[in-house]
Image (cartoon, grey):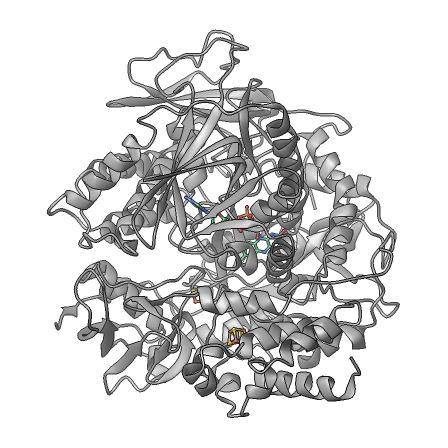
Amino acid sequence: MTATLDTTAEAENKPAAGEIPSFDVTLKIQRFSPEVGPDPWWDEFTITVHGTDRVLDALHKIKWEDDGTLSFRRSCAHGVCGSDAMRINGRNRLACKTLLKDVNPDKPIIVEPIKGLPVLKDLIVDMEPFFASYREIMPFFINKGNEPSKEHLQSSEERERFDDTTKCILCAACTSSCPVFWTDGQYFGPAAIVNAHRFIFDSRDDGATQRLEILNDKEGVWRCRTTFNCTEACPRGIEVTKAIQEVKRAMITRAF
Amino acid sequence: MQTHQYDVVIVGAGGAGMRAALEASGEVRTAVITKLYPTRSHTGAAQGGMCAALANVEEDNWEWHTFDTVKGGDYLVDQDAAEIMAKEAIDAIIDLEHMGLPFNRTPEGRIDQRRFGGHTRNHGEAAVRRSCYAADRTGHMILQTLYQNCVKQDVEFFNEFYVLDLITDHDLSTEDMADGAEVNATGVVAYDLATGEIHVFQAKAIIFATGGAGKIFKTTSNAHTLTGDGMALALRRGFPLEDMEFFQFHPTGLAGLGILLSEAARGEGGILRNSDGERFMERYAPTIKDLAPRDIVARSMANEVREGRGCGPNKDYVLLDLTHLEPSHIDAKLPDITEFARTYLGIEPYTDPIPVYPTAHYAMGGIPTNVEGEVLRDSHNVVKGLFAAGEVACVSVHGSNRLGTNSLLDINVFGKRAGRSAAAYSKTASFHDLPADAADRTIAQLDEMRDRPEGERVAEVRKALQETMDANAQVFRTKESLDQALADIRELQARYKNVSVQDKGQMFNTDLLEALELGFLLDLAEITVVAAINRKESRGGHYREDFPDRDDTNYMLHTMTYRRPATAGDTVDGTVENYFDHVEEFGDYKIVLGSKSVTQTRYEPMERKY
Ligand SMILES: Cc1cc2nc3c(=O)[nH]c(=O)nc-3n(C[C@H](O)[C@H](O)[C@H](O)COP(=O)(O)OP(=O)(O)OC[C@H]3O[C@@H](n4cnc5c(N)ncnc54)[C@H](O)[C@@H]3O)c2cc1C
Ligand code: SF4
Ligand code: FES
């Protein structure tokens, strides 16, 4: 299917992008719907977009003006809610954070669902397995002592120690870019380890031993083969591989 | 169709919903129904902070915080509620810290605090450091922390379920109820996005925590999913909405996009400049300048642009200047928002000022509640078993203009209170029978929308709505502009009856849900504009150029808007205050405007100067 839509009216309202004119772009999107048939198929759409439009704008344009059945998740539209991780030209990204002009619009832009999780419809995958491994690492603060009447004290350095991993928005871009996760659905995956890291390195938390035990499992951190796909994929710029390495090291150095 | 029974059903899993869930789920059988995965809720987008007079870095106390809240809201705030919020703020912050929230720290290891618009020392003397924060992702940390604790507490979620109807034992949209008569909320009807199946939830207590309605405007900091569902459902069931004319336009949205750059940017020293490079806020708010409350800054910006001192090729925005700040300071305190400027506008904030313009941000109005979170069905009668908290509700702690950081506070304080009240109520109450046809209205609505073979596109109607709201009901309003908006909305309501969806399937039919969400938006935009037409004064976020002054004699009142059948009388009921006595007739229904008095305790209204 090919469609050309005129979107100049929309474009006129966009600001400050004088130098980047509108251009045409083709999206080649992997489609699937169990209500249509058992196999996925590809659709191509050619649309006119504005210089500062993102992949999410293009998907909206297609859905709103051409094919309402195209299905994807989204909410915040500026990279903070984690709804719209997808494979864009073979790389996991958030559609709302990926400018079309930055993904070589001269060739069709290939859009697919993230890999390793069951596809339910078009770009929507089943997130339950992802959240299940997140829940397994006890992703919550555990504090055994008496609660202080005010806040726990924590130095800025101690706070900084786990800052990077607090940024996670659970988008699954990392986990679904991991070759180990693709072949072994049991592996906890980088996102779960990132969230364990967030607590293991929090000076106020007392649950590190339990979490390290969980991650010492055969499907835990040791499955990581340090391919750095996850770090590259993370839209929040979290050094995912480094976090996994730090958890591995903690396992060796902390007696439990 | 499936049916479920819970003591407490919470609709919405943002900050307010999850804070309520943490209270209720330990006590009684609780379910949380949410159209998004909890961590996708828009609370996660909040950046700047949450205020509490901890006095960790300088002298402060809750009474000053109360005063700022009341004054910031241009005295339309219920002062008893504001006082509760400011007092309980301190425990709310400590609660969050004890749940693990990683706040930024002072050199002594205490929770750090920074300045924020409208928060002052000793009743306006100077800006005070009151906002507790975690870099510029405070909302993200709150949402994550609350979700983590819900996981810890094994809270039961129904994710990607859309609540599409509220069931009550009396339908106030068709029935008049006498003063004091009992009305009970008995359940909700939800649609499972994954399968298209209908689920009916019977509950002793229901908490609405569905967030805001920013998508009635085109330029907004709100998520695509903030379509005001809870407010619209309450309205359709005959419950009033309070103060809907008051919508906050946040000064610093990325120009043209609406993506928010937190006020923290100005709290950390950022300055607004016009095309002459002038720090124009010095003219409008000589004392606190760029940190004046949002309504004042937004209007000042819009006025600079109107008077030809805007920047850029079309002179349609002003600049937020951070270039005098150390890059390391920017990285430490404002990492996310500076990245937004880089990603979406290609601007490097270290060296170049950022184009900004006001963006629709926050609904001060909503479902009226008392301080226990109980929903009111008029100026004083509560609906049994119905509670609301968060942006969907109007307590009213924000009056006509919310201060920055007071919403994250609101969702924590009143989310907790609503959760506690609902749990306590459900322990004493019993289930009410649901009518056999409880889901029929919803099913009929879905079928009609899905089966309509051909018609207009949802996106076109929605775009027209958002454009007229931006053009006619934004920062500056007049009778003419609002009449135009209302006429447009009337026409769009008619066109809405003829929209159709292309996706006819059952699974993940987001096409269908967007159509229903548009229905909510239209109803809310209509109410907003009618209430704005009625309020012939300027106060807080509502600015009428044809009535530029605050008029305490006639308008020191909350607006209560009711949607009633065309055949009903023009008062809500004989005993209810109906001061405004303003009625707009629309074919099969009409909108009746009543009022509710403002609770004043400590503070006499004064002129609001900064
Ligand atoms: C960009 C931005 C920055 C902000 N920064 C700050 C700040 O620094 N400080 C501050 O105090 N405030 C800030 N605010 C305001 C504040 O974040 C919000 O007002 C607050 O988070 C609202 O929380 P909530 O729980 O009421 O709603 P939300 O977090 O929006 O949650 C709504 C929930 O309702 C659910 N829902 C909605 N409709 C339905 C339905 N029909 N069926 C089922 N579920 C439904 C959704 O799934 C979601 O879980 C900011 C707002 C924005 C937009
Ligand atoms: S670590 Fe990064 S990529 Fe992985 S889930 Fe979190 S935010 Fe997404
Ligand atoms: S839509 Fe929220 S991250 Fe992209």
Outermost residue toward the front? Answer: A218
Report the front residue among B206 and A254: A254
| B40 left or right, relative to B491 | right
**Residue appearing at x 54%, y 27% in the figure:** B385
Counting from the top left corner in percent of width and height, residue A75 is at 42, 59
Residue B286, compared with residue B228, is above or below; it is below
Counting from the top left corner in percent of width and height, residue B237 is at 39, 26
In which image quadrant can residue B443 be found? top left
Counting from the top left corner in percent of width and height, residue A86 is at 37, 74
Report the front residue among A14 and B93: B93
Residue A197, compared with residue B160, is above or below; it is below
| B478 left or right, relative to B609 | left
Count the labels in the image. Answer: 0
**Residue appearing at x 60%, y 35% in the figure:** B399
Report the front residue among B202 and B166: B202
Residue B605, compared with residue B248, is above or below; it is above
In which image quadrant can residue B21 be found? top right
Residue B139, compared with residue A204, is above or below; it is above
Report the front residue among B22 and B306: B22
In what quadrant of the picture does the N terminus of chain B appear? Answer: top left
Counting from the top left corner in percent of width and height, residue B47 is at 60, 61
Q: Is residue B67 visible?
A: yes
**Residue appearing at x 47%, y 67% in the figure:** A82
| B203 left or right, relative to B49 | left
Q: Is residue B77 visible?
A: no
In which image quadrant can residue B62 be found? top right
